Image (cartoon, coloured by chain):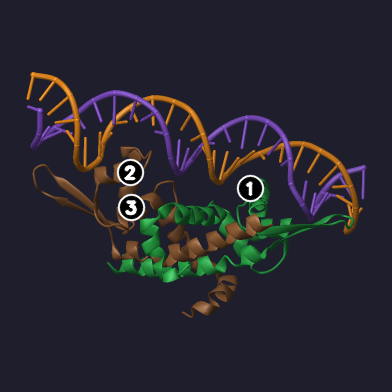
Chain colours: A green, B brown, C orange, D purple
Amino acid sequence: MDISSELENLKSCPTQFVMAINDTMNVISGKWKLPIIGSLLYGKKRFRELERGIPKISPRMLSKELKDLEANGIVKRTVYDSIPVIVEYELTISGESLNQVLEPMIEWGLQHRKNVIGK
Amino acid sequence: MDISSELENLKSCPTQFVMAINDTMNVISGKWKLPIIGSLLYGKKRFRELERGIPKISPRMLSKELKDLEANGIVKRTVYDSIPVIVEYELTISGESLNQVLEPMIEWGLQHRKNVIGK
DNA sequence: GTAACCAGTATACTAAAGTATAGTATATTT
DNA sequence: AAATATACTATACTTTAGTATACTGGTTAC
């Protein structure tokens, strides 16, 4: 699919592209998804490391969002059967490839902020 | 700012980039924002045109989201003092420039769907 | 004169998202 | 033996987002 004509296609045949956008949105929407993904950009983390690294998150939310991200193929959960058990979370390839959507969001956000303040 | 090093920067100094991402998210999140923006990609539209064009949206939600989008500088509202009054909505430059973030979202979404189905 | 179109607003409700607080089972440290 | 750590789960609550239904005030068509 030719990227330069996607906007044109979005006009003429929205549904499948809107679905793709919604898929992407679902993966990163919610209060805690980006902080979690951001934390995991540093590399593997254990549950309590994430909890300590993300201010104000509750274990309930962390657990819920990690399950969500895992179900969506963004995060991989590994249990080591050491004693005591160690659980590690890391980004999948799909998770890491999210930078290709986050970067344009950073660009647009910074530009938009300039525009709005500029007025 | 060098885009190719933004991910690296996101790791080392997250707050301002995370803020930019959140700004972008806020602009397009919610059930009706994308359908509205999508409709306006076709060009100017009047309130009832949008209402008819977006299945299941209620006038309350349409009104609320349009105000939101206007407040965020995504949509411009023009009132013509004809009789009866005509109100037109259109995307601003900022609004149109959203394609630079929507296109990567389409790409990522399609790719991710392939990955998930592929497994 | 009544029915319909325009551009919405008002009120009340349900559903989804997020918070607060406490507790589980296991193991290690002091 | 008591305190602390890990990796969570359970229950109850509040807050935010979205829905349903009706209505307003003006204008035009039949």
Number of marks in picture = 3
Using the numbered discs, state the Cα–Cα distance from disc 3 to disc 2 in whole angstroms.
12 Å
Helix, strand or loop for disc 2: helix
- Identify the disc placed on residue A61: 1
- Identify the disc placed on residue A19: none
User: Which amino acid does the dot numbered 3 rest on?
Assistant: Ser
Left or right: where does residue B39 sit relative to residue B26?
left
Badges 3 and 1, same chain: no
Using the numbered discs, state the Cα–Cα distance from disc 2 to disc 1 in whole angstroms.
31 Å
* Picture coordinates of residue A42, whole percent (x, y): 66, 69
Left or right: where does residue B30 sit relative to residue B66?
right
State yes or no: discs 3 and 1 in contact (Cβ < 8 Å). Answer: no
Res. A50 image quadrant: bottom right
User: Is residue A24 in view from this perspective?
Assistant: yes
The residue pinned by badge 3 equals: B39
Left or right: where does residue B62 sit relative to residue A2?
left
User: Is residue B63 in view from this perspective?
Assistant: no
Q: On screen, D24 above or below A97? A: above
Q: Chain of mark 2?
A: B
- Which residue extends farthest bottom? B2
Res. B57 image quadrant: top left
User: Which amino acid does the dot numbered 1 rest on?
Assistant: Met
Using the numbered discs, state the Cα–Cα distance from disc 3 to disc 1 in whole angstroms.
35 Å
User: Which amino acid does the dot numbered 2 rest on?
Assistant: Leu
* Picture coordinates of residue A15, whole percent (x, y): 44, 51
Residue shown at 13% from the left, 44% from the top: B85
Residue shown at 44% from the left, 62% from the top: B102
Helix, strand or loop for disc 3: helix
- Identify the disc placed on residue B62: 2
Left or right: where does residue B113 sit relative to residue B86?
right
